[in-house]
Image: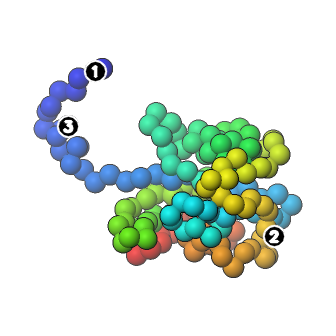
Amino acid sequence: MNSVPQSNFYLSESKRFKIKVGVFLVLIHNGELLCLRRYNTGVEDGLYVVPMGGLHEDETPLQAVVREALEEVNVTLKVQDLKLAHVMYRKHTQPDGYYFYQQDLFFVANQYTGIVRNLEPHKADDVRFFHLENLPDNLSPFIKQAISCLLSGVQYSEFGF
């Protein structure tokens, strides 16, 4: 393990504001959006979202969205087939009132391989495509905003403030 000198720079950096990074896959096939209905997570259960997850240490956002797609819905992506389409800065409020700030990166996949399946039934109880003109009423509000922005060419938005 490398030891880091405790200079003023490192001490000030340790106190600096930190933010979570979320990655989201916007997989549109034949005019339909792939969605998952959250289940048994304690956060937004019963609402539809897109495949998503958090950034791990030593992982880039592109690597993270590739990993999450494979882990959640059995979809294999190539980094070169992904395009960053929307960025959202969000105040992520939990059911107990606790909140944190999160930078969300929404990537569109141009192509993929694999047969879409729910590989995390303990976190999602439905995985399917919805036509973009008929998205579910119980689509998570922040996902609804992101998709609307993305389809309109809006590259940045804020949510939850």
Mark 1 or mark 3: which comes first in sequence? 1
Q: What kind of residue is marked 3?
A: Tyr
| Residue 125 visible somewhere in the drawing | yes
Residue wearing tag 2? 131
Mark 1 residue element = loop
Q: Nearer the viewer, residue 78 or 40?
A: 40
> In terms of image quadrants, where is residue 141?
bottom right
| Residue 156, position as x, y percentages in the image | 53, 65
Please report contact status of discs 1 and 2: CB closer than 8 Å, yes or no: no
Task: Farthest residue to the bottom: give it.
Answer: 137
Left/right placement of residue 99 relative to residue 46 reads left
Mark 3 residue element = helix
Identify the residue at image location x=18%, y=44%: 12
Q: Nearer the viewer, residue 110 or 95?
A: 95
Is 42 placed above or below 75 here?
below
Residue 10 shows which numbered tag? 3
Report the quarter where the C terminus lies.
bottom left
| Residue 146 visible somewhere in the drawing | no
Mark 2 or mark 3: which comes first in sequence? 3
> In terms of image quadrants, where is residue 138?
bottom right
Identify the residue at image location x=61%, y=55%: 123
Identify the residue at image location x=46%, y=51%: 21
Report the quarter where the N terminus lies.
top left
Q: Residues within 10 Å of mark 2 (few under 14, many from 20)?
A: some
Residue 41 shows which numbered tag? none
Please report contact status of discs 2 and 3: CB closer than 8 Å, yes or no: no
Residue 2 shows which numbered tag? 1
| Residue 7, position as x, y percentages in the image | 14, 33
> In terms of image quadrants, where is residue 90?
bottom left
Cα separation, mark 1 vs mark 3, equals: 14 Å
Q: What kind of residue is marked 2?
A: His
Camera-side mark, 2 or 3? 2
